[in-house]
Image (cartoon, rainbow, N blue to C red):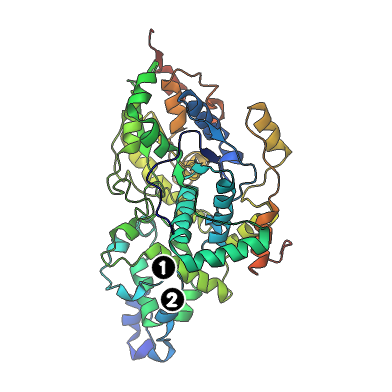
Amino acid sequence: MAKRPEKSPSLSRYALYTGCTVPVRAFNYEISARKVAEKLGLQFSDIPQFSCCGYPIKSVNRYAYLLMAARNLALAEEKGLSLCTLCSACCGALSEANHEIREDEKLRTRINNDLSEAIGKRYNGGSEVTHFIRVLQKEIGMEKIKAQVRSDLSSIRVAPHYGCHYTKPSTIYGHIEDPEDPKSLDELIEATGARSLSYEDKLQCCGGGVLAIDEQVALAMAHKKLDHIRAQQADALVLICPFCNVMYESNQKKIEKAFQTEYKLPILFYPQLLGLALGMEPDELGMKMNRIKANELLKKVSRRSA
Amino acid sequence: MRGRLGLREEVVNAFPNCFMIDSRNLDPDFKYLIASEPGGENIKKCFSCGTCTAGCPVREVTDRYNPRKIIRMAILGLKKEVLSSQFIWLCSSCYTCYERCPQNVKIPELMNAIKNLAVREGHLPPAMRTQLDLLASYGRLLEITDFENEKRKEMGLPLLPEKEEDVKKILVKLGIHRGEKT
């Protein structure tokens, strides 16, 4: 099999892969990502036939997961596109499958036989998979982002949450950054002018991976991190995965109740923060859909005179 | 009074979480079975250092999940206890241990291999059954209805099909779903 191409796809060669959670539960993530992408000169294509990435059934039947992932990869490949995901779990699952099926010829033959018999598709390994945040970091770049900043966010202090599947397992991402000391999200936050905070357990998991199996365990995991973020008096938590958002935003009230505490911590998707810095209106970025209102944070945004 | 393994009752009571291993019930081939399952290949490399458990965010909030102990149980051959357990399903797949394991045991992948074996032995958690049904019905975990598409339209987002039948075809072909709701 040919080696992975060195060159990254050109900026208009991405299909936006939204997965299961984003198009139903995180409209604000999708809309803000599309808006900032457009502003920064990144054109997405859409493939409405994309389905679940396969990750949820990996624990039930690993091969079924690979086949579902291969189907999505094949759909993008037919159009000569690579995949840009908004969900970190989708990014991990699709990258891992892509890596494994591309490297293992025997597996690839089996996958292609089953794909062709079941749904008439074929996987050739011609597409790449990346995360939207990685595209902002690596392809748009900090300098271009900084040059387009139109608002002053310098009095805003936010806590970054990297989550797990954005950097790990590092082998499937070609060790693109140290999973024990990642910097990309901090740098992207600082590029907006806002301050990125350090806090205890910054790299810890949100707990989303066990939510379906044991809610109490998942809530306890998110609770610990929310405590640590509150200790830093952050204006908001900034994240890059819709499932982390389910834990910190959708379940924040439940956590407050279960642990007899109160956070009222606004949760922003990174593209929302970036959009504010680029001078966009909160409404354009879906801020109305954030369940925990970020009014105090929005008051700290001030327009720079041109 | 003497209880388990002839130990005095007060000794047994002092360690309520301990269970005594009866070597007659061990399956020495269990580790080979796991090693032949994709993701489980490196199980025999584990030397029980406990790096996985020390950094595990799930272990930090509950003692029901302890990867080092589960691997030790699997290597010893406690097949029934491992496959029928709830604890194998508590791995959050955060990959912290995957990065830190000095023996490259790839613990989240190993746990996944064990879960796949457990499912084949008939231990499918209800939550996973629900997810399988949703995927077979819609091709996604969350249903997209007119309501979502109406909202998407209002916001200028592209509309999405309510169903993606290909996923059902894949699940049916592999024999892990019958195609209708179970």
Q: Is residue B13 visible?
A: yes
**Image coordinates for residue B181, horizontal then vertical, percent:** 72, 61
**Image coordinates for residue B166, horizontal then vertical, percent:** 67, 55
Q: Check disc 2 and give the amino acid type.
A: Ile
Mark 2, other Cα within 10 Å: few <14 / some 14–19 / many ≥20: many
**A245 to B95, vertically: above or below:** above
Discs 2, 1 touching: Cβ within 8 Å: yes
> Mark 2 falls on what kind of element?
helix
The tag earlier along the polypeptide, 2 or 1, is: 2
Taking depth in this image into account, of A200 and A153 the one nearest to the observer is: A153
Residue at the location (65% across, 46% down)? A49
**B21 to B176, vertically: above or below:** below
Q: Label for residue B34?
A: 2
Q: Check disc 1 and give the amino acid type.
A: Leu
Residue at the location (48% across, 23% down)? A39
**Image coordinates for residue B78, horizontal then vertical, percent:** 42, 81
Q: Return the chain for callout 1.
A: B
Residue marked by disc 1: B110
Q: Return the chain for callout 2.
A: B
Mark 1, other Cα within 10 Å: few <14 / some 14–19 / many ≥20: many
The quarter of the rendered structure image containing the C terminus of chain A is top left
